[in-house]
Image (cartoon, grey):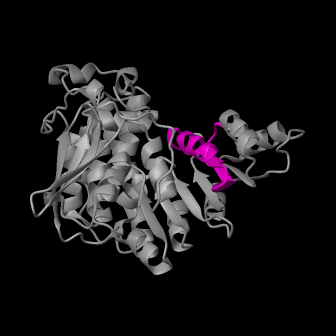
């Protein structure tokens, strides 16, 4: 049995991962589960899977969780708190694989620690790679870690790569990646109406069940922008060789175009258990619990070019990856601040791109050669974004 640590167990990816684990109890043993603050869900997960460790990020919630498990069948679980505890459980000797599913920049350090420790990284946290780029990939190479993408699009691309392909390599026969996007809930909304979009409308994704932050990113297509940057790194390709394609049915999860004219596509129902199960069973396959695709119900599939006037965040992501250096970190940090401000109803939906663009304009594409520079750029970009938000409020 393989030991599994799930970073972000109570989120949608974590819940789906445990669903897959429950179908294969002879192959995976849950060693550690981590949560931000949702201790009720964490408690139920602990009752079902009885991990050795549970990490709750905030100390007060961790104390509350200790009281919750006292006298229960899982009272012997070691409860830890704090960001360093995330790194601790991600690098335990009996952990073989780490599901990196913490949303946002908070997932960088524990995921990087797991990579340095030579673990199999099931990467659902795109921000970790967007921020640290080559530093992360070098850690994987140096330690002999295995990096398997979980995002449905990157997982699809990985499945369409040549036999024996390893992330970070150049697939010489592949000339182009077609990165699919659903287009989110506002694909057809008149652009003038986007100024009045509410958080509830933005998080109502038509195809995927995701958390609030990622759902907003999908609505702005920043999610696709971050995936574009991640794809450049995972598959060692230029942004000019990655084309974003809006495919509202979300049946084709991405495609790889080869030099001989072949285009390979990975298809399936929009359910994250498919890429999760693929990565967990790799290089084999096992049941994910996802219903078979009924192609007759799909009936037809549509494809569109993204409108960069409607989705300026996608344009900003292309600009960030082409500029290089710290700019992807700045992009991500400003986006996290802007999205939270929108969810808190402090700014409008259309202000998200404005905040990011104005924040990026305050930085040069300085080197991102070490982690300290990346973390500094992250903090500085957040401060700049907050100032831009304050200016918009006046």
Q: Which residues are magenta?
A: 11-38
Please indicate whether residue 86 sits to the left or right of residue 384 in the image. Answer: right
Identify the image quadrant of residue 366: bottom left
Looking at the figure, which quarter contains the N terminus? bottom right
| The stretch drawn in magenta includes residue 14 | yes
* Closer to us: 323 or 91: 91
Please indicate whether residue 87 sits to the left or right of residue 337 in the image. Answer: right
**Residue 394 appears in view:** no
The answer to whether residue 15 is above or below residue 189 is below
Residue furthest bottom as drawn: 142
* Closer to us: 16 or 60: 16
Q: Position of residue 27 (x, y in %)?
A: 63, 56
**Residue 346 appears in view:** yes
* Closer to us: 18 or 268: 268
Q: Residue at x 9, y 58 (%)?
A: 261
Residue furthest right as drawn: 71
Identify the image quadrant of residue 247: top left
Q: Position of residue 333 (x, y in %)?
A: 38, 50
Identify the image quadrant of residue 194: top left
Q: Residue at x 46, y 35 (%)?
A: 211
Q: Position of residue 132 (x, y in %)?
A: 39, 65
Q: Residue at x 33, y 56 (%)?
A: 159
């Amino acid at each position: 049995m393989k030991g599994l640590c799930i970073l972000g167990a109570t989120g949608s990816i974590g819940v789906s991962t445990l669903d897959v684990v429950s179908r294969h109890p002879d192959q995976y043993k849950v060693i550690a589960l981590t949560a931000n603050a949702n201790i009720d869900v964490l408690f139920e997960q602990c009752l079902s899977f009885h991990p050795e460790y549970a990490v709750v990020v905030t100390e007060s919630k961790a104390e509350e969780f200790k009281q919750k498990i006292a006298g229960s069948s899982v009272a012997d679980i070691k409860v830890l708190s704090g960001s360093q505890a995330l790194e601790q459980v991600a690098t335990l000797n009996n952990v073989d694989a780490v599901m990196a599913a913490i949303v946002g920049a908070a997932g960088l350090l524990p995921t990087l620690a797991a990579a340095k420790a030579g673990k199999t990284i099931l990467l659902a946290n795109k921000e970790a790679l967007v921020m640290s780029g080559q530093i992360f990939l070098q850690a994987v190479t140096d330690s002999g870690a295995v990096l398997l993408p979980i995002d449905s699009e990157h997982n699809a691309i990985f499945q369409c790569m040549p036999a024996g392909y390893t992330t970070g390599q150049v697939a010489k026969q592949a000339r182009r990646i077609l990165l699919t996007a659903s287009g989110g809930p506002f694909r057809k909304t008149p652009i003038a109406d986007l100024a009045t979009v509410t958080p509830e409308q933005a998080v109502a994704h038509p195809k995927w069940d995701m958390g609030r932050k990622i759902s907003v990113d999908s609505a702005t297509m920043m999610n696709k922008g971050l995936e574009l940057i991640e794809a450049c790194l995972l598959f060692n390709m230029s942004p000019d060789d990655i084309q974003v394609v809006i495919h509202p049915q979300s049946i084709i999860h991405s495609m790889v175009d080869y030099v001989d004219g072949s285009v390979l596509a990975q298809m399936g129902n929009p359910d994250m258990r498919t890429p999760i199960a693929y990565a967990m069973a790799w290089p084999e396959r096992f049941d994910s619990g996802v219903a078979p695709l009924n192609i007759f119900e799909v009936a037809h599939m549509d494809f569109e070019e993204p409108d960069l006037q409607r989705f300026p965040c996608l344009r900003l992501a292309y600009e960030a990856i082409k500029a290089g250096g710290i700019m992807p970190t700045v992009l991500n940090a400003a986006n996290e601040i802007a999205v939270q401000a929108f969810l808190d109803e402090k700014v409008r939906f259309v202000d998200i791109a404005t905040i990011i663009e104005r924040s990026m304009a305050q930085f040069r594409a300085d080197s991102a050669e070490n982690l300290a520079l990346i973390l500094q750029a992250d903090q500085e970009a957040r401060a700049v974004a907050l100032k831009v938000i304050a200016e918009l409020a006046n």
